Amino acid sequence: MTKPSADALSRFSINQMTVKQLSLPELVEACVRLGVRGVGLWREPVAEYGLEATAKLVRAAGLDVSTLCRGGFLTALDPAGRAAALADNRAAIDEAATLGTDTLVLVSGGLPAGSKDLAGARERITDALASLGPYAAEQGVRLAIEPLHPMFAADRCVVSTLDQALSLAERFPAAQVGVVVDTYHVWWDDMAAAAVARAGVGGRIHSFQLADWVTPLPAGLLNGRGQLGEGSVDLRGWCAVVEATGYSGPIEVELFNEELWAGDGVGLLTDTLRRFTALAI
Amino acid sequence: MTKPSADALSRFSINQMTVKQLSLPELVEACVRLGVRGVGLWREPVAEYGLEATAKLVRAAGLDVSTLCRGGFLTALDPAGRAAALADNRAAIDEAATLGTDTLVLVSGGLPAGSKDLAGARERITDALASLGPYAAEQGVRLAIEPLHPMFAADRCVVSTLDQALSLAERFPAAQVGVVVDTYHVWWDDMAAAAVARAGVGGRIHSFQLADWVTPLPAGLLNGRGQLGEGSVDLRGWCAVVEATGYSGPIEVELFNEELWAGDGVGLLTDTLRRFTALAI
């Protein structure tokens, strides 16, 4: 294996879902052994291991938590649903602060059952951000709106492009709300590079994530994200676009892939780091 | 069943793939019986039945052929692949003219194997259109670029938005090249309504197609298009957007759906017409 450069290691962050077959202690141990310094965490496995215990574990290992995934799901129409979503997001913000990350990733939510009103759903996200942004900033946490690929618009995320995400974010201070640039979701979009530049100028690239696009996609779409270099995405090109804005933060690799999950987790982490290094960030 | 209005019947066209369990004679007979006046045809079943025989069959039944699907696949990098694609598209144009339709739908093609260059692939489509457009116009056929949902960008169609399709089309006269507006592919896009308006002003809405978006999507993505009214698309809203441009041509219903194909074809056509009528075009 090419030895990862200090530069690559200083930028690389492994999203926990990429290697979800690893327990938190296994993940942390592997990171330390391989020289990986950043991890992106998910609320569910963190809760399972214990929030305080996780915070202690990663802190003791000297790991940086690049992001916490995820808050969001802010498109409910009914008052009870909206109140529950706000409460859950405040809890997620608290968890992010406890874990020592400055970034909470938001997946906005899809259309409520029976609704066909995308524009209305997008407006309700704005309303929720107006409430959550100041609360997050008080905890030292930035909200990062992640546009999801348009194939998720109905059932998962009505924010489908980086332009849409940025237009939502720009209604608030950058210290409160920014965006996630994830190559998996934006690679097809000829407007996305300009949106990255605009996000960079505004200091709103709160997270940068890599995954490749491979076909055919599996049923349900979720768990077919490609390992770096296996698909159609010009990852090196996208890294250059993001770096050109002056972005110097973590670059997180987030793959959801049944085949990769079926194998050895430490081997997968090692291979992912090798592929990341080969991109010569 | 609500009796279809004369207006609905004058606009409705059934794409052959929607009811692919019907043979051409069965389809034509059902159309005549139900008062359907328009059909969109596909090259493969037409070739199977015979091009001249199909032309004679639909002409004798007084049916209008709203579109022929499909040409395209114009992204090859190698000269032999490009020449073959041009020859195949000229053949498709000839077939369209023989069938008496003025519109050939183009699905542009995905990335060539190993390529990550979306912009380059889009440019090669332009080169091909420069060759095919004049030939088509001579036969009285308009080329209609169909943007496909971004989930098909890698393997099927690098033209992912109506804006992209229109920007390609606008390099040529409208009598040569226009676009397909298909709700299935553009419904998620907050820029699409403005693009429809721009296409209308330019006389470039060469086809308007309806399908609904239902989840979860099946593996491979292709055959999960929803029956009208079953999904998340504001079909009535999109019809209004297209009609507002002054478009008064056929409205084609094109569904690819394994479940629908498993049932009775005439029943499916009847139900599709009923649902179309309920949209109160």
Image: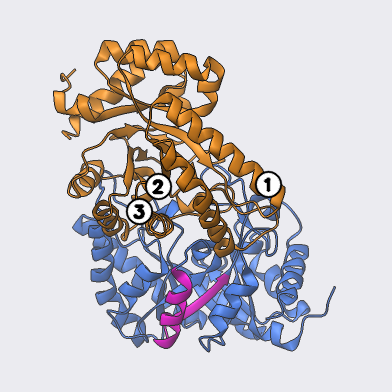
Chain colours: A blue, B orange
| Callout 2 amino acid | Gln
- The 10 Å Cα crowd at callout 2, few under 14, some 14 to 19, many 20 or more, is many
Residue that appears at 26% across and 24% down: B273
Mark 2 or mark 3, which has the lower sequence index? 2
| Callout 3 amino acid | Trp
Which residue is identified by label 1? B81
User: In this view of the protein, which residue sits in the foreground, A84 or B90?
Assistant: B90
> Which chain is disc 3 placed on?
B
The magenta span reads A191-209
Q: Are marks 2 and 3 on the same chain?
A: yes
Q: Which mark is residue B176?
A: 2
Give the CA distance from mark 2 to mark 3.
28 Å
> Which chain is disc 1 placed on?
B
Give the CA distance from mark 1 to mark 2.
23 Å
Magenta region includes residue B131: no
**Does residue B44 appear left or right of residue B149 in this picture?**
right
Mark 3 or mark 1, which has the lower sequence index? 1
| Callout 1 amino acid | Gly
Q: Percent x, y for residue A204?
A: 42, 82
Give the CA distance from mark 3 to mark 1.
33 Å
Which residue is identified by label 3? B188
Residue that appears at 32% across and 73% down: A167
Asked whether residue B163 appears in the rendered view, the answer is: yes
SS at mark 2 in the image: loop
Q: Are marks 3 and 1 in contact (CB under 8 Å)?
A: no
